[in-house]
Amino acid sequence: MLSRVARFEDLDESVLDGFTCGDVWMDGWLANKASRQLKSGLCAMHVGLDEDGLPIGFFTLATCQVMPTDVLKKERHGYNRMPFGALLIGELAVRADLRGSGLGYGVQLLNHAIFIACNISHDAGVAFIVVDPLGGNEHICRWYQHNGFVASPGGSRHYMPIRKARERIDALGEDYFRFD
């Protein structure tokens, strides 16, 4: 179980030195692009830590827009031209030695990302949470679908209506997100 989730900017920046999730693209992003994107405000990163303060994984959040054609008609609420405000879970990675461990670290990180997105949605116009699975990777797409995301009819994106996200968070309960 995660011991806590913290904003990367609140941690020693060396916390992710040597981190690898085993995916070449994701490891390359972390090593070569993450710092610049974080400094320029393109995204915010959150790190899941274990009891010893070691990183279990991380996720990023960024604002984005979703076109009505990218969601099912029943989710458009009559809007057919105006884009919807959304939050993108841009990257989500679990440390390589913990992947497939059956401990659910990926789901825990995803739930925390959804929790933060729901909190933001109370103060800003957020209709959807969006993910763009790496290269349309079928395994990753199925994982997101299993966790409540819907495949976009307009491409490889997957989305979760904020209403469904709030239901998910409510079902988990406040204690799930409290670290003592």
Image: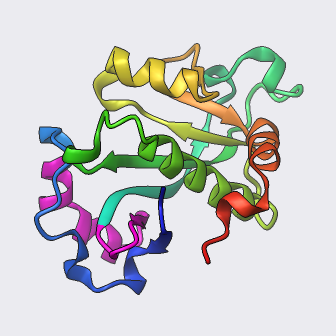
Residue 32 or residue 164, whichever sits in front: 164
The answer to whether 26 is drawn above or below residue 121 in the figure is above
Q: Quick check: 173 left or right of 95?
A: right
Residue 108 or residue 151, whichever sits in front: 108
Residue 1 or residue 19, whichever sits in front: 1
The answer to whether 72 is drawn above or below residue 48 in the figure is above
The residue at 16%/50% (across/down) is 27
The quarter of the displayed image where residue 33 is located? bottom left
- The residues colored magenta run 27-54
Asked if the stretch drawn in magenta spans residue 125, the answer is no
Q: Quick check: 35 left or right of 70?
A: left
Q: Quick check: 25 left or right of 45?
A: left
The residue at 73%/29% (across/down) is 81
* Position of the C terminus by quadrant: bottom right
| Image position, residue 61 (x, y; %) | 49, 57
| Image position, residue 79 (x, y; %) | 83, 29
